[in-house]
Image (cartoon, coloured by chain):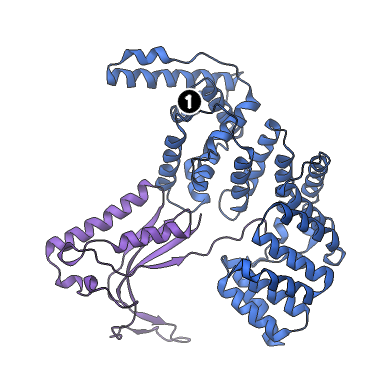
Amino acid sequence: MNEDVVRVLAPQVLGILVRRGNDFAAAEDAVQDALLEAHRTWGDAPPDDPKGWLVTVAGRKLIDARRSAAARRRREDVLALEPEPGPAEQVDDTLLLLFLCCHPALTPASAIALTLRAVGGLTTREIAEAFLVPEATMAQRISRAKRTVSGRPLAQPGDVAVVLRVLYLIFNEGYSGRVDLCAEAIRLTRQLQLACDEPEVAGLLALMLLHDARRAARTDEHGTFIPLGQQDRTRWNQGEIAEGVRILQTALARERRGEYQIQAAIAALHDDARAAEETDWPQILAWYDELLALTDNPLAALSRAVTVGEVDGPLAGLSAVDDLAARLGDHHRVDAVRAYLHERAGHLDLAAEHYTRAAAQARSTPERDYLTKQAARLRRR
Amino acid sequence: MPKYLLLKHYTGGPERHPNSASPMSEWTEDEITAHVAFLRQVADMLRERGEFVDAQALRPERTYVQYGGPDAAPVTTDGPFPETKELAAGWYMVDVESEARAIEIAAYVSSGPGKGGLPLYEWIEVRPVMTDIPATTE
């Protein structure tokens, strides 16, 4: 039995069952049961129409489950509620499932887990390994999420922005675990793009591709973070960059900009420079201004300050950080930015001091190691 | 989702609340049973909510070990250490939505029953675990 085929089909089958009016949690259980039966009976010879087979078997499992529930409660009338078979359009079903799995009633962590399971087709164990929690914990998280969305009507189409946020969070979980969540996020966003003609969906897909392209160059062989300016650009994935740029250009041409398209545009300008010195900083600064006019994201404001440092010199950058300081509070990346700008301004002692402070606040070990080494480099001179 | 280590201590930490002044060795059997049952119930609650990663209890003895140098046995020292030194008694590792949720859980752990069945008000140390680097750092 081909696992890839099954992973593509499972969410489609689930979408069809949910569209026919079945309860989400019950339908998901039925699909899992049908997959088990497929494992048992298909062997190396899957049926000609594997999707049809799975829909039929899962539908039967649903009826079985309803019958035994009815028998338990001695209420035969439940059978009368068997929903009519409905149309089975794969594309819209994926969208419907994504809206359900990213329902606003769910916490981000629950939405992520449910999306990976019900739309991504990952097993509970794979999701647990990706997030480094026990399988039982992940099973519980998914089952609570299913209960939360079960029976919630989806009369109106969901909010695409909520789905995009969940997919973006999945992408940012990274690729260090046994399951490559960046690749998963890209796969899911591609599916969403087929189902939903929104420039921001394309923007997010482009953003993911343009960042994923730099993956091989982002850490050294010891796992230490390498910042953009020092990466070996020959290791960037040109195929992903070309695809990301193409998707982005089509999206931008529609003149309905959003934060993902703008962030993708910034990533594209970085990816476009063959050497760090060739980066088109004034253009990047213009995009940051547009981004900040749209969202009040402190991290974007900090990145803008770095860009000001590139365009107008490190002192201008430092003063841009000072202007932000009150708003950013003790954001853990402020010291790292100050350290970088101080070094460029030739204030090496101050730079070392800020790198040390930044290392103490780092949230991840690759960043901490990088910042500690910067401080050490400046102290050794 | 961020992970947090919630540490319980035998000794050390900020000044103790009167309810957690007496060590467990001075509690009655019922008081100990109630406390242990509470700790299990916390773990069950975390499992049920999909937030549980790990829980362990540590024995109080400790040995400091140091490399002894080439061709030498390890250097060890097992106290006694001054009472003020922090001595961890055990932990919960949780995988939660936010720091606020980690603090909420820690406060609940701190409310567990102690002597006389009263809430212990013990200090729980909350430590964020390093994450992986986000995939979109520019």
Color of chain A here?
blue
Q: Which residue matches tag 1?
A: A34
**Element type at mark 1:** helix
Report whether B16 appears left or right of B105: left
Q: Position of residue A303 (x, y in %)?
A: 72, 63
Q: Which chain is purple?
A: B
Q: Answer yes or no: is residue A180 visible.
A: no
Given residues A369 and A189, the one toward you in this image is: A189
Image: B92 above or below A190: below
Given residues A196 and A379, the one toward you in this image is: A196
Report whether A25 appears left or right of A327: left
Quarter placement of the N terminus of chain A: top right
Q: Quadrant of residue A201?
A: top right
Report whether A380 appears left or right of A272: left
Q: Position of residue A212 (x, y in %)?
A: 70, 52
Q: How crowded is the residue under tag 1: few (<14 C-alpha within 10 Å), some, or many (20+)?
A: many
Image: A346 above or below B103: below
Q: Position of residue B5 (x, y in %)?
A: 41, 64
The residue under the point 69% across, 65% down is: A302
Report whether B96 appears left or right of A162: left
Numbered disc 1: what chain?
Answer: A
Q: Quadrant of residue B88?
A: bottom left
The residue under the point 52% across, 25% down is: A18
The residue under the point 80% across, 61% down is: A285
Given residues A7 and A355, the one toward you in this image is: A355
Mark 1 belongs to which amino acid?
Ala
Q: Answer yes or no: is residue A301 visible.
A: yes
Image: A33 above or below A228: above
